[in-house]
Each structure stands twice: as structure tokens, then as C-alpha cells.
Amino acid sequence: MPVSYRRAGSDDAARLALIAAATFVLACPPHTTAGGIQSHLEKTLTRERFDEYLADGDRMLFLAESEGLPIGYTMVILGPPADPDVQAVLSIHPTAELSKCYVVPGFHGQGVAAELMRLSVEAAGEGGASGVWLGVNNLNVRANRFYEKSGFTVVGTKTFYVGTEREDDFVRERAL
């Protein structure tokens, strides 16, 4: 099936929230509870939150679609990270964060994530960044393999909470 890619617009919040709800769980380690996942979804991945993200001039969201249905998305955040653990390990400045990179399972291995990554990294560079960083659960083997293949190296660690559950993430960085 053909896939199209575009920068998400203000009318895409519901589509982004739908795909976020379907894919966030894929990034969680097996020990993550359903309650933690639900809490995270309600706090950060609702339609209302995507409305906020889309209105933020320092954020760029990209959407992959097949036959009119959303199948993947990324979010880039321009500017320095707020997390002091991340600030301490990054070596490339100015930077941007690849905050989200998700594709529905039926499209894994078909180049969708790679094209979303290409668009996101290109946009970060156009936005003035010299490097891109991301956080990824250290137990997420598939994502870590993809990010390594995409040129991101582990430069440190940070804490991430799913609800009230503490997770350990690698901080990965790449030059543009």
C-alpha cells in the first residue's frame, strides 16, 4: 500500500492522538502496568495535548498515512532540553529532540519509520539544530536497533515516568 508523508497541521490532533494511543504501548517494557500506560496516555497523548503540540512554534509533527489512515508519526522539539540529566550528556549544540517516533505494527520494516526519521532530522536542521537527541527505554531492543541504524549513539541515561512508574532510558544523540 502506498504511504504518504506530510507535516501535521492543526486539524490533525485527533489523528495523532489515535495513533499515539495505538503505538505508545509498543515502546513500554513488559513490566509496565496498564494503569501506568493509561495515565501516560491521559497526561501527554490526548487530542487536547496534540492541539497544544501543534500550536507550539518550537514543535514540528510529521504524519505518515496509508489509504487516508494514520500509520505513524514523529515529533521534533527545537531548543535545549529541560532535563538536567540530558543537558549534562549532550555534546552537540544547538540541539533538537526527537520526542516521538512511532509506527503501527502492520507497517514495521517497510521504511515508514526511516522516512519519518529523515523528514524529522531534516526539519531539525532547517530549524537551526546541529544535532538531534532522543530518549528511548533501555529495554526496547527494536527501537534501540533502529536508532543505532539511524546514526544515534548512546551518550547517557535519564529517568522517564510512565504514570508513576520509573523507567530507565538511554539518551541517544547524532550530529546533523
Image (cartoon, helix red, strand yellow):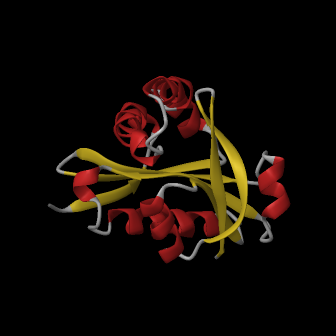
Farthest-out residue, front:
31
Q: Position of residue 71 (x, y in %)?
A: 29, 49
Seen in the picture, residue 150 relative to 12 is either above or below; the reply is: below
**What is the quadrant of residue 3 in the picture?**
bottom left
94 or 170: nearer the eye? Answer: 170
Using the rendered image of the protein, determine whether residue 62 is visible from the camera's viewpoint: no
Residue 75 relative to residue 82: left or right: left
Using the rendered image of the protein, determine whether residue 144 is visible from the camera's viewpoint: yes
The residue that appears at 40% across and 69% down in the rendered structure is 114
Q: Quadrant of the N terminus?
A: bottom left
57 or 38: nearer the eye? Answer: 38
Q: Position of residue 170 (x, y in %)?
A: 64, 58
Farthest-out residue, left:
1
Q: Position of residue 84 (x, y in %)?
A: 84, 49
Seen in the picture, residue 56 relative to 170 is either above or below; the reply is: above
**What is the quadrant of residue 171 in the picture?**
bottom right
Q: Position of residue 132 (x, y in %)?
A: 65, 65
Q: Quadrant of the C terminus?
A: bottom right
Residue 83 relative to residue 6: left or right: right
Number of dots carrying numbers: 0
37 or 45: nearer the eye? Answer: 37
The residue that appears at 48% across and 76% down in the rendered structure is 149
The residue that appears at 53% across and 39% down in the rendered structure is 54
